[in-house]
Amino acid sequence: MVELVVKSPANARQADAITREIVKGRLRSSRVEMETLLERTAMSAFIREKKDYFVAIYDAAGRLVYGSNSPSGSAVMECILERYAVKDMLHGDIYIYNDPYVSRGGVTHTPDMVFAAPVFADDGPLVGFSVCWAHHTDIGGLAAGT
C-alpha cells in the first residue's frame, strides 16, 4: 500500500482521526474492488495468477493518492497529463498507453499497459483518475506473446 502525504494550504483544516480512518477505509475498499474486478475479468495469466498488476487512485494533478505496490508512482500519469489537457478530458474517456520510452518508467516493456479513466465530481470538475497498470500475455504483435 502506498499513501501520499500532500502539503496543505495554511488555511486548510486538519481532518479529525475518525474522518481520516473513514476516508482511508473507503480508499482501501475502492482499491480492493478494482483489484477484484481486474482479476475476475482478466484473460492474462500474468494478471490472474502472478498478480502482475497495479491499481490506484490519482488526484487531478496526477499525484498518487492510494494504490497497491506501485511500480512507478506518479510516472504512470505524467505522460498522459503532458499530452492531454485536463480541461479537454470528458466523462467516459479512457487513456491507454504501453510505450516504455515516453512513460519514463511508467511501463517497462510493451506488454505492460496502463489504462487511466478520469473521475469527475457530480457535474463538476475533474477530481482524479482511476488507473490500472497490468502485464498482458499478448497484445497483438507479430510473434506470439508480443
Image (tube, helix red, strand yellow):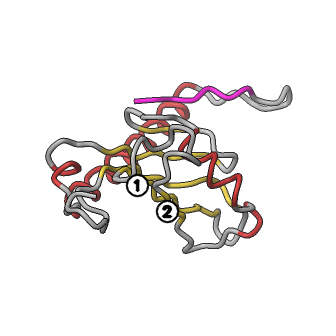
Residue at the far right: name it. Answer: 11
Expressed as whole percent of the image width and height from the top left, the position of residue 117 reads 53, 62
- Near mark 1 (Cα within 10 A), the count class, few <14, some 14-19 or many ≥20, is many
Q: CA distance from mark 1 to mark 2?
A: 7 Å
Quarter placement of the C terminus: bottom left
**Vertically, is 69 above or below 39?**
above
Residue at figure coordinates x 38%, y 32% from the top left: 69
Which secondary structure is most common in the magenta stretch?
loop
Expressed as whole percent of the image width and height from the top left, the position of residue 42 reads 23, 61
Residue placed most toward the observer, 62 or 43: 43
**Which tag, 1 or 2, sits closer to the chain's start?**
2
Left or right of 22, for residue 129: right
Left or right of 72, for residue 1: left
Secondary structure at numbered mark 2: strand
Residue at figure coordinates x 68%, y 72% from the top left: 123
Expressed as whole percent of the image width and height from the top left, the position of residue 53 reads 32, 45
Residue at figure coordinates x 75%, y 61% from the top left: 85
Expressed as whole percent of the image width and height from the top left, the position of residue 90 reads 65, 72
Labels in figure, total: 2
Q: State the residue position of label 2.
A: 96
The amino acid pointed to by label 1 is Met
Secondary structure at numbered mark 1: strand
Looking at the image, do the residues carrying marks 1 and 2 touch, with CB atoms under 8 Å apart? yes
Residue placed most toward the observer, 63 or 126: 63
Residue at figure coordinates x 39%, y 46% from the top left: 109
* The stretch drawn in magenta includes residue 115: no
Residue placed most toward the observer, 94 or 31: 94
Stretch of the chain drawn in magenta: 1-7
Tag of residue 71: none
Q: State the residue position of label 1.
A: 113
**Vertically, is 92 above or below 67?**
below
